[in-house]
Image (cartoon, helix red, strand yellow):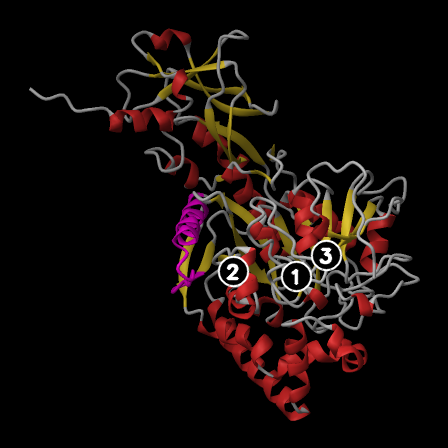
Amino acid sequence: MVQEKTLPTPAAPLAPQAWIHHPAQPIAGAPTGALAGLTFAVKDNIDVAGWPTTAACPAFAYRPDAHASVVRRLLEAGALVLGKTNLDQFACGLSGTRSPYGAVPNAINPLYVSGGSSSGSAYVVATGQVDFALGTDTAGSGRVPAGLNNIVGLKPSRGLISARGVVPAAQAVDCVSIFAPTVAGAVRVLAAALGHDAADPYSRTLGLASEPFSTRFRFGVPAELEFFGDEAARAAFDDALAQLKAQGGEAVPLDFAPLSACAEMLYGSALVAQRHEAIRNFFDVHEVEVIEPVRSIIASGRGYSASDLVAAQTRLAELGQQAEALWKGIDLLVVPTAPTHHTIARMQADPVVLNRQLGAYTNFVNLLDYAALSVPASMRPDGLPFGITLIGRCGSDWQLAELGQRFHHATGLTQGATGVPLHAPQPIPGLTSAPTVRVAVVGAHLSGMPLNAQLTERGATLAARTHTAAQYRLYALPRTTPPKPGLLRVASGEGECIEVEVWNMPLAHYGSFVALVPQPLSIGTLTLTDGSQVQGFLCEPLALDGATDITHLGGWRAYIASLKAAPVATT
């Protein structure tokens, strides 16, 4: 049996279940490269030369002589691999509880599941132990753990990253996936990892879309959503849709029946024979060494004939034709990454039904050759993370990343379980777009406020909700319609951090926007809490005669809320 080891000086509390192999000496990459200085972990169904590959089955373990293609590329780009991470055995499961090495806990609340099968990879990213990690994704294993741990899960288009050196689960649809705290971090890894590999039968050269989605994009949403009684998840998804609409999106209800039927086929048809074929030489001799329910799932693949498989493939093609019709008039699909969240104890008591629930919105994606990106959306009132998944056509990887980054940064969330703020958004490689100006708004132009349309009608998109540096004071100006605040820069030590929204305004429309700004307001340069500078609203000091200082409230929204909460005088 492979012995578990621990990090010598972990950056966060280490869960022994998260790592399967953690040697004292990591493998260093090239001294220079696009990923120089970054550390990563590898799901233990992906080969690292000289280290055991177990796929969470000790009897299956072997020591490969060569790195998996993706690991080699990342090392050549300068990254440093620290170890191998736990997973649902043979990458069969979405819960993170199906491993003889133990269940991987959720990074936010250890009583809850981490999601799987790439459970350990998600955990070590969410707890800050590595900069990124590799997972695999066949039915959602590179997305569900991301959504349940407040991190980003990038599931690229099939064949974009080579799967040579990966223990297959269902080889025709397997994808190597990437976990990172931010979208920018994930796409940085994708840019280094992608590339055709003739030694991988399913690798391919893909032309990736180079134009971002329109500032007025349309996204499909299931007309009927199932959250399995989890109303906190339903509310969180509604909030996420509202945020996408604030960023210029239009929700389009869709009949999700073809996608749901497709998802059911992954395990409920002869397609499950792929699971058996992937490891049949081992499984047919060592079946007893495989834990339940993984054993039963893989064994079920032996019960189908070749004719059954052909019939299933034909049915899948029929559903693909029906699904194709859903794309008319939309740019992408948006679904909950996971519709609910279960405790480890409950999952272990009902491992098949509850696992299936976690995959309600993931299983169809690879079967239909889509790209997907799971991004954090919010923290629920019960303290659990909630994420959404953006799904696009094959080759839409950079487009999903651009929108996903804007969405993530607008949430105001921190990275994983670390509490570290998100870094500034970064350009998405491979995309060409018109130049923009970052504009901070503080009052009537905020999302949902009376003048927000002046931004959206010019194609501006919400980039982030954040705060100014602590060198401003905020005032409610008298006699303004609609009511407006005045933001004043003050001397060091006299100001506070004020809530703002940062919008990306197309440069071509920036002049017409500035022309609408009335006195005593003006556009100047604001310093944000992270030290970066943007264009934004400021006020002339002379206009503050009769104004009310509302700095202590922290922002215009809080001031408006205080007015609504104030008692009405009676006579």
Where residue 219 sits in the image (x, y, percent)? Answer: 47, 57
Instruction: Give the amino acid type for the residue marked by disc 3 in the picture.
Output: Asn
Residue at 69% from the left image edge and 43% from the top image edge = 185
Spatial separation of the CA atoms under disc 1 and disc 2: 17 Å
Where residue 307 sits in the image (x, y, percent)? Answer: 64, 93
Q: Which mark is residue 117?
A: 1
Residue at 66% from the left image edge and 72% from the top image edge = 294
Q: Quadrant of residue 14?
A: top right
Marks 2 and 1: in contact by CB < 8 Å? no
Q: Quadrant of residue 159?
A: bottom right
Quadrant showing the C terminus: top left
For label 3, the residue is: 86
**273 or 534, nearer to the observer:** 273
**538 or 22, nearer to the observer:** 22
Which of disc 3 and disc 1 is earlier in sequence? 3
Residue at 89% from the left image edge and 63% from the top image edge = 64
Magenta stretch: give its range. Answer: 221-246
**156 or 102, nearer to the observer:** 102
